[in-house]
Amino acid sequence: MSVIKKMVTLLRSSVREIGESVVDANATQIYEQEILDSRRNIEQARVDLTAVMAQEMQTAREIERLKREMARYEGLAVEALDKSQESLAEEVATKVATLEAQLEEQAKAHAGYAVQVARLKDLIRVAEARIRDHERELAIAKTTESVYRATQSISDNLGAGGSKLANARESLERIKRRHENLADRMVAAEQLDKELGDLALERKLADAGIGPDAERRRLVMARIRARQAGAEGQG
Amino acid sequence: MKALLEQLRGLDGLTGAAMGGVAVQLQPIPGTVPVIQVSIEGREELPIFVTCSDTQLLCMCYLWTDAEVKPARRTELLETLLDLNPSVPLSSFGRVGDRYVLFGALNRDARVEDVAKDVAELSDNALDALDALSEFLK
């Protein structure tokens, strides 16, 4: 049965049950042991595979050599016949027959090694698939358990403090209101900044003798001077 | 494998910085598995919980419970969540018991910088999702 199918069945239980029961300690141990065993099998299979592949290559080389030898001796036998050396040709034919027997033997061994290579490669593939399966199964089970246990802890903890995870809508409203307050404060601050900025500018303009304030001072000054001039004229 | 709290050292500062300088607090939750509560200033109602198993580190935000869903619109909500799932960056919708969650999963050995990024993203996504989907809630 697939891991996810098992989970679907399990998830029909309550939060607390799931938190406690997803990871069956026994099953976990078995899986972990199987993962270890599979790893070891893979290592051994890799060592074997290297050896067998080396032998496969050796036999392939030997087959090539024997074929070359046979061709050479057959050529020599033909030459012997050409020169009517019948018995020499017979002798060479015996040699070729021996080589042919050796070639057959090597070819058989080579085929055997090829079969072994294929078998070892399958073995490694299967073992790796099993490791992946078990690891995934363990990961899913353990993560489910963690998540449910964490949720249990969180609810227990918040419940013990007299509060609970708040109603979502209320939470949202509160956060939004706080956000609006912040936004309002920022707008107010911005306005204040602007007003203060304007004030500073007006003061600078006045200092430079520009604007209504500067004009007013000039007019007052002129009035005072006029008064003074009048007083001097009378005196 | 490092202890969770040790692995998350500095998460408060990094998350706060990622969110533009807000205050962030870390609080371990007692229980049988390691859980750290991450509270973000201004979003105290939507804390992020970081927990872990042997293979994963999970950041979770609890959104609402089954009881809060308008029964007449439940199927529509579930379909919307499925549709949204592939689109929401770094976060997925899920359900733990009767609680709907938004979560992000990281490698068990994730760097605290990556966890901070995930937490910040998750918080933004959770708030956004809550706002967008509140029409399905009572």
Image: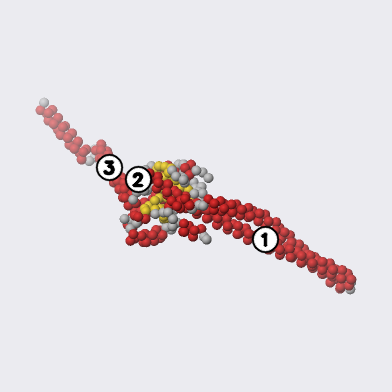
How crowded is the residue under tag 2: few (<14 C-alpha within 10 Å), some, or many (20+)?
few
Q: Residue B77, how many percent across, how many down?
A: 36, 59
Residue lying at 31% horizontally and 50% vertically, measured from the top left = A170
The amino acid beneath tag 2 is: Ser
Chain letter of mark 1 equals: A
Q: How many marks?
A: 3
Tag shown at residue A57: none
Q: Earlier in the sequence, mark 2 or mark 1?
A: 1
- Is A8 located above or below residue A212 in the figure? below
The amino acid beneath tag 1 is: Val
**Of B111 and A192, the residue lying toward us:** B111
Residue position for label 3: A192
Q: Earlier in the sequence, mark 2 or mark 3?
A: 2
Residue lying at 58% horizontally and 57% vertically, measured from the top left = A130
Residue A182 located left or right of residue A66: left
Q: Which mark is in front, 2 or 1?
A: 2
